């Protein structure tokens, strides 16, 4: 009896070892961030990290990422995106921590819109050492696409700035004085827009740029204060001494709309901004802003997720993907392309 009992115990023990060796936590990919034991076998987890989570632009990016996730899963894939970013677009330290956390949790891939073109280099290099591919979207970072990161998915921001300059020049009859109100140092996307604007506006000999070195910073309150300072700085008896202004992103654009409206100058200053959102779209409809250079943030989020998924599946991807831009005016609001950009179907994906 003792020998028989001993044999049974040994068989049971060996069976337990064999079962453990076949994958005690479900086998397959171990990729679900903080809670790996609950990860379904084969799931691909992709972290999508925006610059911030406050402005409407990022809600559109999120909608695009969710659209990609749904399409991939409907086609038989097993993809989970995790959307997480800092509340404020000025919080570089928080974004660095978020990237570092996802790297330590060993997600399968990361889509990142870096707040700073140098501060995020370290975390991206660490992701590379851990064999976690990164797609950069919206705003560039120092490094070589295809080597330091997989791909760069974004608007051609310099061309967007040039388009803004062309539109403003046309509004002014190619003559007058203009102001460029900048966003924040270290933000590659807006820097490229600003540079593109200055390069193109310089082609018009009768247009003078009288201010191009003022930064608002990432916060709406700071942008509003700087907008008011600019108006006071150039105030004259019957208005201001500039005829037009270019703003490179949503918070700066809205700040100038409000400042010009408060000063009753919307009919005296031509304003071309960058990006949209509910309030800016309303301002365009009311002709309080005469032009908005529009990105396609839904497409940006969509292509970022699709690109990293293709890479993870072993497919070749382009190292630079342009998501396109258009200029909206009060006269072309009903054009289908413009309407799709101004009124994206966010409820379809965010609810």
Image (spheres, rainbow, N blue to C red):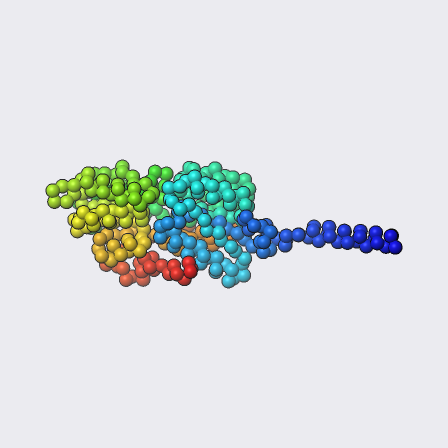
Percent coordinates x, y for residue 305 in the rendering? 47, 53
Q: Is residue 260 above or below residue 332?
A: above
The residue at 27%/37% (across/down) is: 213
Left or right: 36 with respect to 187?
A: right
In this rendering, the count of numbered labels is 0
Q: Position of residue 119 (x, y in %)?
A: 43, 37
Which residue sits at x=71%, y=53%? 19
Q: Residue furthest front?
A: 1
Residue 306: x, y in percent?
47, 54
Res 125 seen here: yes
Q: Does residue 113 appear in the picture of this structure?
A: no
Q: Is residue 191 above or below residue 40?
A: above
Closer to us: 248 or 280 = 280
Residue positioned 24% across, 49% down in the render = 257
Determine the residue positioned at 52% across, 56% down: 79
Q: Quadrant of the N terminus?
A: bottom right
In terms of depth relative to the viewer, which is nearer, 87 or 349? 87
Q: Quadrant of residue 296?
A: bottom left
Q: Position of residue 333 (x, y in %)?
A: 27, 59
**Quadrant the C terminus occupies:** bottom left
Judged from this view, the residue extending furthest toward the left is: 237
């Amino acid at each position: 009896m003792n020998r028989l009992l001993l044999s049974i115990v040994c068989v049971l023990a060996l069976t337990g070892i064999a079962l453990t060796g076949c994958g005690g936590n479900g086998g397959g990919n171990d990729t679900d961030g903080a809670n790996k034991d609950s990860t379904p076998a084969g799931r691909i987890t992709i972290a999508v990290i925006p610059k911030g989570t406050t402005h409407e632009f990022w809600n559109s990016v999120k909608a695009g990422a969710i659209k990609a996730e749904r399409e991939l899963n409907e086609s038989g894939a097993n993809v989970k995106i995790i959307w997480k970013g800092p509340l404020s677009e000025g919080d570089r330290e928080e974004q660095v921590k978020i990237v570092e956390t996802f790297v330590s949790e060993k997600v399968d891939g990361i889509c990142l819109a870096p707040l700073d073109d140098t501060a995020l280099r370290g975390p991206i290099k660490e992701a590379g050492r851990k064999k976690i591919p990164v797609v950069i979207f919206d705003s560039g970072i120092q490094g070589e696409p295809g080597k330091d990161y997989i791909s760069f998915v974004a608007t051609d921001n310099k061309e967007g700035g040039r388009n803004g300059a062309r539109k403003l020049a046309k509004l002014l009859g190619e003559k007058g004085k203009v102001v460029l109100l900048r966003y924040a140092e270290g933000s590659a996307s807006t820097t490229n827009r600003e540079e593109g604007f200055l390069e193109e506006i310089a082609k018009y000999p009768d247009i003078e740029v009288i201010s191009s070195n003022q930064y608002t910073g990432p916060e709406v309150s700071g942008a509003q204060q700087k907008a008011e300072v600019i108006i006071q700085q150039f105030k004259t008896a019957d208005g201001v001494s500039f005829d037009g202004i270019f703003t490179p992103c949503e918070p700066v654009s809205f700040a100038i709309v409000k400042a010009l409206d408060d000063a009753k100058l919307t009919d005296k200053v031509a304003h071309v901004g960058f990006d949209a959102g509910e309030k800016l779209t309303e301002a365009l409809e009311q002709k309080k802003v005469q032009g908005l250079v529009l990105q396609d943030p839904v497409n940006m989020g969509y292509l970022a997720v699709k690109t990293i998924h293709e890479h993870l599946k072993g497919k070749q991807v382009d190292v630079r993907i342009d998501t396109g831009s258009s200029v909206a005016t009060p006269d072309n609001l009903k054009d289908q392309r413009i309407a799709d950009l101004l009124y994206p179907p966010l409820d379809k994906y965010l609810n």
